[in-house]
């Protein structure tokens, strides 16, 4: 019995080490959110068992929980580097697959067609200038290369309320729309898909769309990026703890082996 009990501990320690290593590896990934492993004990018994004699038979991984606390904000100076000061997620749609993704990584740029995207063909979603965020769905953010007067695009700015304003070389300004943010009733239920992107699931609930400065969505900070919320010092302590956890279970297996060998070698 002790072999299987300690073996479950070894497997859990390996999972813990993998999660901590993943956190450390992404300490410099913009918009990354760290995770932790939640363990639970396993107990076997019946209604006829003496509760004073019940033994545990190991542990199991109950969940790998994501931590969505806000990471440090780094100033970059680029107008399309955006950070959210609240709980909102940027919404993007992949141009090829139509897959809807959510991210805290606000590192955006424009492509040759004027679409604002993240470099992986995921286009930022915005509300049209006259749209109602409670009724109208978000659309792809696209900056016209020329305005109605034929003037060429010169630059843009993003306000704290998410309003994207394009400037043209004739001195005119054009309202492109407002950045669409999404919130979830249970962010920890979001599915990680890589590159600091998440997908909605039944556990997270459907996204609620809104614009910056409303409710808990938070303001937009232009010229800034949210860094990873991984604390290296904290992760190194967790790494040492997971290593000791692994070593202790390995030692328990070694001790059980020695006891078994002693019993086998007994002579009458």
Image: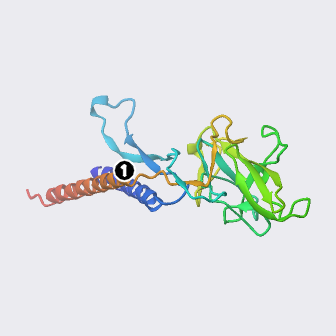
Q: Residue at x 58, y 60 (%)?
A: 194
Secondary structure of the residue carrying numbered label 1? helix
Q: Is residue 71 above or below residue 132?
A: below
Q: Nearer the viewer, residue 48 or 17?
A: 17
Q: Is residue 82 visible?
A: yes
Q: Nearer the viewer, residue 76 or 211?
A: 76
**In terms of depth relative to the viewer, which is nearer, 82 or 244?**
82
- Counting labels gives 1
Give percent across and percent down for residue 90: 66, 50
Q: Is residue 141 visible?
A: no
Q: Which residue is mark 1?
A: 234
For label 1, the crowd category at 10 Å Cα-Cα, with few meaning under 14, some 14 to 19 and many 20 or more, is few
Residue found at the very far bottom of the displayed protein: 112
Q: Position of residue 112 (x, y in %)?
A: 77, 70
Q: Position of residue 177 (x, y in %)?
A: 79, 49
Outermost residue toward the front in this view: 171
Q: Is residue 220 left or right of residue 244?
A: right
Q: Is residue 40 left or right of residue 200?
A: left
Q: Residue furthest left?
A: 268
The residue shown at (66%, 60%) is 108
Viewed as shown, does residue 55 lie left or right of 158?
left
Please tell me in which quadrant of the rendered image residue 264 appears: bottom left
Which residue is located at x 23 percent, y 56 percent?
A: 251
Residue 64 versus residue 46 in the image, above or below: below
**For the C terminus, which image quadrant?**
bottom left
Q: Is residue 199 left or right of residue 257?
A: right
Type of colouring: rainbow
Residue 207, position as x, y percentages in the image: 69, 43
What residue do we see at 36% from left, 29% from top? 48
Quarter of the rendering containing residue 95: bottom right
Locate residue 214: give its quadrant. Answer: top right
């Amino acid at each position: 019995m002790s072999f299987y009990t300690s073996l479950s501990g070894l497997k859990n320690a390996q999972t813990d080490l993998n999660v901590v290593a993943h956190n450390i590896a992404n300490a410099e990934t913009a918009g990354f959110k760290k995770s932790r492993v939640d363990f639970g004990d396993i107990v076997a018994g019946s209604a006829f068992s003496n509760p004073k004699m019940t033994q545990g038979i190991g542990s199991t991984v109950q969940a790998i929980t994501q931590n969505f606390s806000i990471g440090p904000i780094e100033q970059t100076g680029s107008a399309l580097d955006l950070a959210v000061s609240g709980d909102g997620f940027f919404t993007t749609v992949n141009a090829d697959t139509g897959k809807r993704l959510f991210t805290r990584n606000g590192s955006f740029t424009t492509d040759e067609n004027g679409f604002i995207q993240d470099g992986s063909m995921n286009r930022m979603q915005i509300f049209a200038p006259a749209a109602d965020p409670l009724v109208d769905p978000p659309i792809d953010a696209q900056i016209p290369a020329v305005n109605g007067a034929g003037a060429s695009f010169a630059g843009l700015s993003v306000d704290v309320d998410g309003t994207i304003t394009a400037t043209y070389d004739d001195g005119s300004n054009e309202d492109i729309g407002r950045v669409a943010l999404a919130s979830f009733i249970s962010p920890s239920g979001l599915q990680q898909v890589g590159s600091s992107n998440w997908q909605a699931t039944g556990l997270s609930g459907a996204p609620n769309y809104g614009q910056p400065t409303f409710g808990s969505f938070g303001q937009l900070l232009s010229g800034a990026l949210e860094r990873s919320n991984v604390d290296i010092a904290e992760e190194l302590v967790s790494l040492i703890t997971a290593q000791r956890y692994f070593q202790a279970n390995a030692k328990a297996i070694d001790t059980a082996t020695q006891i078994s060998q002693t019993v086998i070698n007994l002579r009458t």
